[in-house]
Image: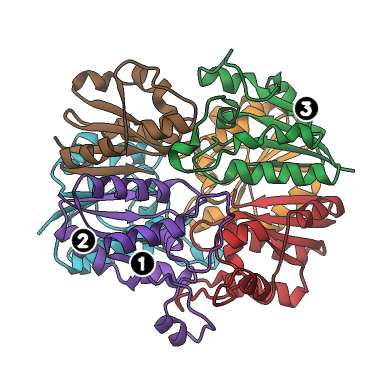
Chain colours: A purple, B red, C orange, D brown, E cyan, F green
Amino acid sequence: MIISLVIHGAPGTTQGAQTALSFCQAALAAGHQIYRLFFYEDGVHNAHALAVWPQDERDLHADWAALIRANKLDAVVCVASALKRGVLNDEEASRYEKPAASLDAGFDISGLGQWVDACLHSDRVVSFGV
Amino acid sequence: MIISLVIHGAPGTTQGAQTALSFCQAALAAGHQIYRLFFYEDGVHNAHALAVWPQDERDLHADWAALIRANKLDAVVCVASALKRGVLNDEEASRYEKPAASLDAGFDISGLGQWVDACLHSDRVVSFGV
Amino acid sequence: MSTLHIVSKSPYRTDALQRCLALVAPGDSIILIEDGVFGVNLLTPDLKALEEGIRCYALSEDLAARGLSVAAAGIRPTDYAGFVVLVCEHRNSLSHG
Amino acid sequence: MSTLHIVSKSPYRTDALQRCLALVAPGDSIILIEDGVFGVNLLTPDLKALEEGIRCYALSEDLAARGLSVAAAGIRPTDYAGFVVLVCEHRNSLSHG
Amino acid sequence: MKTLTFLARSGPVGSSRPKALLDMVLSAAVFEQKINFIFLDDGVYQLLPDQDPARLAAKNVSSALPALELYGVDKVYVDTESLQKRGLSGRPLLISAKACNADEVRSLLADADMVFGL
Amino acid sequence: MKTLTFLARSGPVGSSRPKALLDMVLSAAVFEQKINFIFLDDGVYQLLPDQDPARLAAKNVSSALPALELYGVDKVYVDTESLQKRGLSGRPLLISAKACNADEVRSLLADADMVFGL
């Protein structure tokens, strides 16, 4: 099946992002196609490149980045959610005259149109961290 | 009276940070002394300098920065909370080899010792966004 | 007076108000803020405790923002300045998240 | 089958499980995940609905992480792979936050 | 075309959830999907008139609800039991919404390709 | 010296709350404040043995609880009603905690200079 995920939760604070990642791994292992990961609201913090995790805690940022890279997943961060939360790519950073970008290289920034597109092209869309 | 605030909530996502700011303004207006603002857990997002708010929404980041500056408030961001959430000052950014800092200039990064110190030196400590 | 109980979550969505009522003691006060103000309709019937000299408030800014007014007798609207006064009047405060 | 109801919050702290039970229909399934697995003790007595062919699951990784096991009859433990199967078996899913 | 059912379950002011859900609904409308929008649980508070979020220097998500009609979202429902439980039965509502009960919500869920609730 | 009362009200795994509270307790202990630490509501789940958060590749906040004794935090309580309500009465607990009821919790609140609950 073709599956997309909507991730609402920040890493660390609540468990939703962790569940989404494990679900995504299990879906891939079962041979399903992940059409898109859409990070919405606090979920955009999963794409924050400046986060530093203690060595003895699970670094979800690194785990997402590795999963996305290994499986060439389409990972989109909602632009409206991201701007308010300080998750910017180079283009947004320079547009809003901010001194630095903070989006992990594995993620794209785009609008809710990408979420609608995921609904259109997926058999299932599952929400995590609501 | 001498009052300190502990802020647990991110701006925008829930209302706690907004309530804390209004409470702080009211306490100052009533002549009380604010000993310290301690930003903990998701509360550290209030100090995120890269956030960009739509012009028609309330920019809590700007309101905090203005309030802190105008009243010379002591605003401390918990270091353990901040690192995991990508809120770094220059020192932390270079220590962890991150390309940029993201802490607003009005805030300091420090440990929970500053929260204990606030408990010791305040008559009241109120928690917001729990 | 002892503890100011701060209730900031909807009583329909969470058990914050119930947990508050389980711990409130004579001499304490309760203030409903944020989505906690949805409790203005619920509080009185639940609150035998109110007879024990427990005062109950609701933040007027949060009520107005939601188009609500204080319905139940015994709940007093108060503004942020009043919230600050309550914090000062009580020895400590407990935020029920 | 129609809807997979995903319950991720504690039934003691929030009304997520209640809101799920209010909407669940014959042919639907329920999966308890994250702090939702605290519902394993509660679900059966509450659930006349279970008699109507509603299957109920609890995510085994979340149970084990909390030192819990499935106590009530009629609740089946399942792992992430089983969670994926459930999502595929149902037409849609509703995450009760 | 897909059928998307949305459940507005949170109050209008206390969080970003209602705005996040409305943005999803309007985006789906732009792409001309078949939409059911149901206000239930604390979401029914979004329909109250006379909200004054300016008192919090905040924005009113409810003031954006009339946009639903402009975007052609006309299948809007409000759960009567949720209104009742909150003592809001018979109150005038900001936008017109068809009263529905739990059975009707269940059939809207059953008919949906995807469901989103916030 | 101040008297600080802490209420652990959240489960051990689902959020960062229990770790955030424990860090506060241990910091206050380092500064030698008078501490009461009460497990109640979902917080009693933190005291269950045989938790295996490695199944989630996560860290076990409960495994850090024995540190309380090292830091001299010996006023540790568990609310019996919270245990009962969750069907956990009589279960062995990870650390020794004095059983208490709501009246005792109320008096610990009344005696506190400051209260923190997560």
Per the model, the C-alpha gap separating discs 1 and 3 is 49 Å
Per the model, the C-alpha gap separating discs 2 and 3 is 55 Å
Question: Where on the picture, by quarter, is residue E95?
Answer: bottom left
Q: Residues within 10 Å of mark 3 (few under 14, many from 20)?
A: few
Residue E91: which numbered mark, if any?
none
| Residue D40 versus residue A40 in the image, above or below | above
Label 2 marks a residue whose chain is A
Label 1 marks a residue whose chain is A
Q: Same subunit under labels 2 and 3?
A: no
Camera-nearest residue between C68 and D88: D88
| Residue F112 versus residue C68 in the image, above or below | above
Image coordinates of residue E117 in percent, x first then y, are 31, 49
Residue A77: which numbered mark, if any?
1
On the picture, is E102 further left or further right than F98? left
Q: Is residue E25 visible?
A: yes
Residue type indicated by callout 3: Ser
Residue picked out by circle 2 = A118
Residue type indicated by callout 1: Val
Residue picked out by circle 3 = F107
Per the model, the C-alpha gap separating discs 1 and 2 is 13 Å
